[in-house]
Amino acid sequence: MRDVTRIVGAESSVTVLKGISLVITQGEFTAIEGPSGAGKSSLLNIVGALDAPTSGDYAIDGQQTRSAADRELSRIRSGTFAFVFQSFHLMDRRPAVDNVELGLLYRGVKAHERRTRALEAMAALGIERLAHVRSGNLSGGERQRVALARALACKAPVVIADEPTGNLDSENAQVVVRALRELHESGTTIVLVTHSPEIAAVASRRIGIADGRVVRESHHVDTAEAGSTRVSSSQIPGASSRLRLTDLLRDSVANISSRGGKTAGLVAAVALAVSLTVGSLGVAGSAGSQVSARFDEHANRDVTVEWPSTGLDDQSAEMRSGLRDRLAGVAGVDSASIIENHGQTSVQTGSSREVRLVTGFTGTRESASSARLKVTWAPGVSKKLARGQLLMGSTFARQLELAPPSLSPVVLIEGEPFQVIGLVTQSPRLPELLAGVLLSTEDSGVLNAPERTRALILTRSGAAQQVARQAPLVVDPFDPTSLTVSAPVDPRTLRSEVEADVSTTLLGLTGLALLAAIAGLANAMVLSVTERRQELGLRRAIGARRLHVSAMILCESAYIGLIGGCAGLALGLGGVLAVTISQRWIPVFDPLLAPLAILGGIGVGAFAGVVAAWRASRIQPSEALRL
């Protein structure tokens, strides 16, 4: 280190290191002393390659660090340094042995070898019994020994210890000092920051710092140091700053497993979005199938041919029945009837009752089926109109206070008696009939001359357009264009439009749910990164590259998405079944939705983790750890 200066702060800059020149040789035990604010932590950040000097040069084994890229600095830290902190910096929710393995994780050491070396290091410090205890449940002395075991396991040439006894009682402090001395005697270079003269006294070299400058330095030859074996980076297992894919995946699983409560909340958010997606698509498919069935059953089967009763009205009942038969014989026709509107007709229930004027209709015998009338029939009748019988609209019947059809009520139509054999409760094709009466064509002479005639045709599924073209030729082959024909649009087009509307509405709601899930998960992951700032800083300090920490966050998000996707798939299927069963629909579920739901969950998780991963990659270890 030569003439190193460090300036911090953007607006009001402060020079925390002022022209420090220092050489630490391999195998030394160096203690750095000084009051708070003297610049010890800033110096240690630069020594450990956690920070770069503003000016001056700092080289490690001849390699300059000031101009080195972040990836190269990660490699240097991984291959040269181990850190012991005053605040321990352990992953509190993970077992102690996982913390000890961490340095080896970022050197690509295989899992079995990592575990063996970690347990050996813990045994050397007498804490092997704590291997599978959560770090957050350990005492201060035990936590510091776990941190020492982490440094011991990776066999780094240099151990940097920042106030390692600052939070310990005297007994545990002596344990830590003894462990550092044993490390030094094995050939490890120790750089120690301390406020305690007693702790500093064990070092072979003591450097005093005040106001960002070296103010004193003393050195004495340690017999252990003079004859010790030097540890070099070539003795460290594995390769510097390397992470295996399998280890990345295992580490990510362990991280989310250790945060059960928070993970469950994030999984629930993804599961909700995926279940809404699966449910919406499933319900849309089932509803579309139901819409198709309803169109086939009702609206797209109706064809009406209408004309004024002027040139075609001088027909007998037999001729009208013949016309009905010809229409019924057209290919694609299920049933047909001829209904005539005779205008105002007088109705009364007895000689003492007042006369009511309503619209009177006559129709062929099969009118009820082709007009799709819903009728409450009198018991024992043939359900086809005959001479002297009529159907009465339920609205008009209530106005007359008519007796039910089962009592065979009789009314007078233009003074002639007629038996009411049924009440029309629904009349979708002839709604005015609900307030009128329908007689047989055979009784048309009782009523006024017809004003308008309709041929009501009920076709087979998909035949409406064809029948609509042929029916006018049957009714009036000489002038078919004079007739008014009403037919539904092509059922395939209308069906597609309705199904598209249903799907669009449901998918719109699903899209909002997905966006809400992504936003919520992204926010939670960013907050998680902020909460885990020190852990991520530690990972960076011991050799993790930016790519490693961002990949870890993305994997955690993807795992959460995977679990949420599976849970959401199950919930969505349950929702589809619940809706279809309650509506008595046939459930329709595309098998492709299953893998798409799971992949969608992973996608939601990964996409939501992008911002958090970027934030994690920007963490500077010197700021996160506050050496």
Image (tube, rainbow, N blue to C red):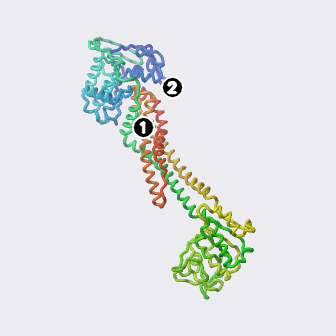
The amino acid marked with disc number 2 is: Ala
Say which mark, if any, is on residue 57: none
Task: Identify the image quadrant of the C terminus.
Answer: top left
Label 2 Cα crowd, 10 Å radius (few <14 / some 14-19 / many 20+) = few
In which quadrant will I find the N terminus? top left
Q: In the image, is 186 to the left or to the right of 577?
A: left
Circle nearer the N terminus (1, 2):
2
Query: What distance separates the C-alpha of mark 1 from that of mark 2?
Result: 35 Å
For mark 1, what is the residue?
Answer: 556
**Mark 2: secondary structure:** loop
Question: How dense is the environment of label 1, judged by Cα within 10 Å: few (below 14), some, or many (20 and up)?
Answer: many
Q: What is the number of the mark on residue 10? A: 2
Q: Nearer the viewer, residue 331 or 131?
A: 331
Residue 175, image x, y percentages = 25, 25
Q: Residue at x 65, y 64 (%)?
A: 467
- Specify the quadrant of the image occupied by residue 365: bottom right
**Residue 84 position within the rendered picture, expressed as x and y whole percent measured from the top left:** 34, 25
Give how far across and how far down residue 167 sits, in percent.
31, 28
* Residue 603: percent from left, percent from top: 48, 41
Compared to residue 115, the image places residue 215 above or below, namely above
| Mark whose residue sits in front, 1 or 2 | 1
Report whether residue 37 is seen. Answer: no
Q: Is 116 in front, or is 124?
A: 116
Type of the residue with mark 1: Glu
To which quarter of the image does residue 422 belong? Answer: bottom right
Compared with residue 140, is residue 367 higher up or lower down, i.e. above or below?
A: below
Which residue appears at 45% of the width and 40% of the height? 524
Left/right placement of residue 579 relative to residue 491 reads left
Residue 461 appears in view: yes
Along the viewing direction, whichever of 236 and 65 lies nearer the viewer: 236
Q: Splitting the image into 4 quarters, where does residue 575 fall? A: bottom left
Tag 1, which secondary structure? helix
